[in-house]
Amino acid sequence: MDDPELSPAAPPAPPVLVLGASSLVGPYLLDRLAARDRTGVCVGRRPPAGGTVPAPGFGWLRLDVTAPAGWAVEPGAAVLSLIPLWLLPPLLPRLAGAGQIVALGSTSVLVKSGSADPEERVVAQRLADAERAIAAFCAGTGTPWTILRPTLIHDGLRDANVTAIARFVQRFGFFPVGMPARGLRQPIHADDVAGALVAALGNGLVAGRSIDLPGGETLTYREMVRRIFVALDRPVRILPLPVGLLARGISVVRRVTGVAYSPALFARMNQDLAFDGSDAARLLGYAAQPFRPRFSASPRESSAP
């Protein structure tokens, strides 16, 4: 039997480069990486407030990913990209030395390609084009790549989905839905997305794959809204209205929530946006939490069970 003291030590884990660390998922991802003693660099245009470090073991590199000049990734580093997927392909030549690239995409590539809103169709096309460009580039460089496609991300703080609905409810005490609002949803907490990203690190099972990340529960749009009322401790006042009428009032919703919603939003309340999470469970050990929204002031509080 080999003497443990003479056995060669395991090689250190490669550094992690986080693109878009200030995004919705960023704080949860950095917490998870730090908890695993991973180290690396966060890249972005705006450094953390007060000059603080993003997380233990992580430095900050101020960089505009749309104009990286002569910058290049540290050879062998694992890249976790949280930036909009269509911004990644132009940056790929600067990432040619990476040991792995894991990028956050969106199931919008699947559901918005046939939208009645031309702007949403453009988004879906940009996502699809980006996925193809990433796969082609990484095939040429021999870089393992993975694209994770979450569904409806929320964190109870600043997301444009669940928190935006809560903001409307807090202001008006009711929420309008396109009747009957029975389209299926699988809201996913930002911390679960972060967990999937970390599980993809060094995971050869997910190389060369695009993987859907649904939330831990499938429920109707109306039920999702009801649970937001309950979480806010407000009387449940859901107002079902004809989709066409609601679409004409979209400007009111935009002003209240601050989110540039598409008029197609209300029609989609009756569209099933549910995805198969079996690949994520099998390859990543992924098990997302059920939808129990909380609205709090810190990422750690909002992700608590």
Image: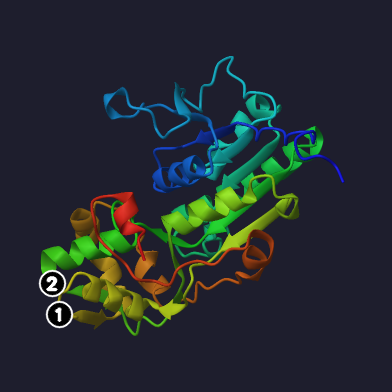
Q: Can residue 250 be spotted in the picture?
A: no
Within-10-Å neighbours for mark 2: few <14, some 14–19, many 20+: some
Task: Name the image quarter holding residue 210.
Answer: bottom right
Residue 10 drawn at (x, y percent): 72, 36
At numbered mark 1, what does the secondary structure look like: helix, strand or loop?
A: loop
Front tag of 1 and 2: 1
Instruction: State the colouring used for the structure image.
Output: rainbow
Residue 165 drawn at (x, y percent): 26, 65
> Residue at horizontal 54%, vertical 21%?
68
Amino acid type for the residue under numbered disc 2? Gly
270 vs 25: above or below = below
Task: Name the image quarter holding residue 73.
Answer: top right
Whichever of callouts 1 and 2 sits on the residue coming sooner in the sequence is: 2
At numbered mark 2, what does the secondary structure look like: helix, strand or loop?
A: loop
14 vs 276: above or below = above
> Residue at horizontal 40%, vertical 44%?
27
Q: Any mark on residue 173, and which?
A: 2
Residue 11 drawn at (x, y percent): 72, 33
Q: Any mark on residue 235, and which?
A: 1
Residue 64 drawn at (x, y percent): 46, 25
Between the C-alphas of marks 1 and 2, the distance is 8 Å
> As drawn, is 174 to the left or to the right of 92?
left
Q: Residue furthest bottom?
A: 180
305 vs 69: above or below = below
Q: Can residue 21 be spotted in the picture?
A: yes
Q: Are marks 1 and 2 in contact (CB under 8 Å)?
A: yes
Within-10-Å neighbours for mark 1: few <14, some 14–19, many 20+: few
Amino acid type for the residue under numbered disc 1? Pro
118 vs 114: above or below = above
Q: Is residue 92 or residue 144 the one in the foreground?
A: 144
Figure quadrant of the C terminus: bottom left
